[in-house]
Image (cartoon, rainbow, N blue to C red):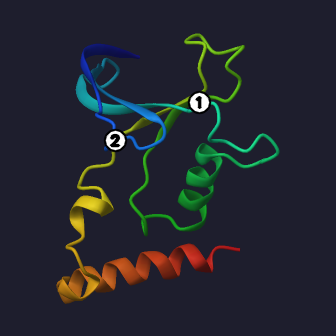
Amino acid sequence: NHALIDFRYFNESEGIVNKLILIRSIDNSVNEEKELFLKLIAPDIRYKHSKTYEPEIINYLKKNLPGKIPLPNILDFCYDSEKSLIKNEYVLMEKVPGKTLEKALPETFTDLPQNLKKQFIDIIKAIRSVK
């Protein structure tokens, strides 16, 4: 149960294929401000034959790698634009605190401090370990 505070569209470079909207809201159940992403899925981006989508992948990683990778909570999603209230496929998720990988990484991996290199490598190893 969220009440809208404000929202903003991300510019083209921040949502390269899908359109992203950052929503600030109040979670009335705990009286806490939250930042949410509404990702509007571009109609041509998703392979129609694919059986696994982003929410399922995120939930699978959360279940199999608890606490090892910062992942958003998926609040809602719809992959059928005909049934969607907004007439578009979408994913609504909580924003994960921190920077995107693109913004966090210096120009070259060798410039990273040792602790960030280790965290990055640990995340990749954890993802690869999931069967």
Residue 31 sits above or below residue 69 on the image: above
Q: Identify the mark at residue 77; answer none if there is no mark.
A: 1
Q: Residue at x 53, y 68 (%)?
A: 65
Q: Residue at x 24, y 89 (%)?
A: 110
Residue 114 sits above or below residue 131 on the image: below
In the image, 54 versus 69, the foreground residue is 54
Taking the image as shown, residue 8 lies to the left or right of residue 1, namely left
Q: Please tell me whether mark 1 sits on a helix, a strand or a loop.
A: strand
Three-letter amino acid code of the residue under disc 2: Lys
In this figure, which residue is indicated by the disc labeled 2? 95
Q: CA distance from mark 2 to mark 1?
A: 15 Å
Q: Please tell me whether mark 2 sits on a helix, a strand or a loop.
A: loop
Q: Residue at x 41, y 17 (%)?
A: 1
Q: Identify the mark at residue 3; answer none if there is no mark.
A: none
**Mark 2 packing: few (<14 Cα in 10 Å), some, or many (20+)?**
some
| Whole-percent x, y for residue 29 in the image | 35, 21
Instruction: Give the mark, 2 or 1, whose residue is nearer the N terminus.
Output: 1
| Whole-percent x, y for residue 40 in the image | 50, 29
